[in-house]
Image: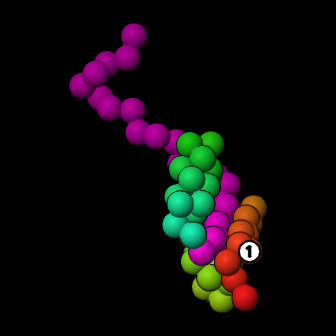
Amino acid sequence: MIDPSHPVSPPVPSQRALVVARRGRARSALLRALRSAGFAVPAADDPHAGIARFVERPADVVIVSVEGWT
């Protein structure tokens, strides 16, 4: 039986994913899905910011949506 007076903290994500997507809806959906799967997920809204984030802290998985970029 779980003691309700001692809340269980969620597990710390062990894998990182990076989402690079311009459109907020697509980015939000991907973030929700990956976080619910246990990934730590930063996001970027353009390719340059995505590269900067990856250089700062590399990810195990990178998802890039190219829709709407020129």
Q: Which residues are magenta?
A: 1-22
State which quarter of the image contains the N terminus.
top left
What kind of residue is marked 1?
Val
Q: Give the image location of residue 51, x and y in percent.
A: 69, 84
In the image, farthest residue toward the top? 1
Q: Which residue is mark 1?
A: 66
Q: Main secondary structure of the magenta part?
A: loop
Neighbour class for label 1 at 10 Å: few (<14), some, many (≥20)?
few
Whether residue 14 is visible here, answered yes or no, is yes
Question: With respect to residue 42, does 31 lie above or below?
Answer: above
Residue 19 among magenta residues? yes
* Apparent side of residue 7 relative to residue 45 in the rendered image (left or right): left
Query: Of all residues shown, which one is farthest toward the left?
Result: 5
Name the foreground residue: 40 vs 25: 25
Q: Secondary structure at mark 1?
A: loop
The residue sitting at 62% across, 82% down in the picture is 46
> Picture coordinates of residue 33 (x, y %)?
60, 47
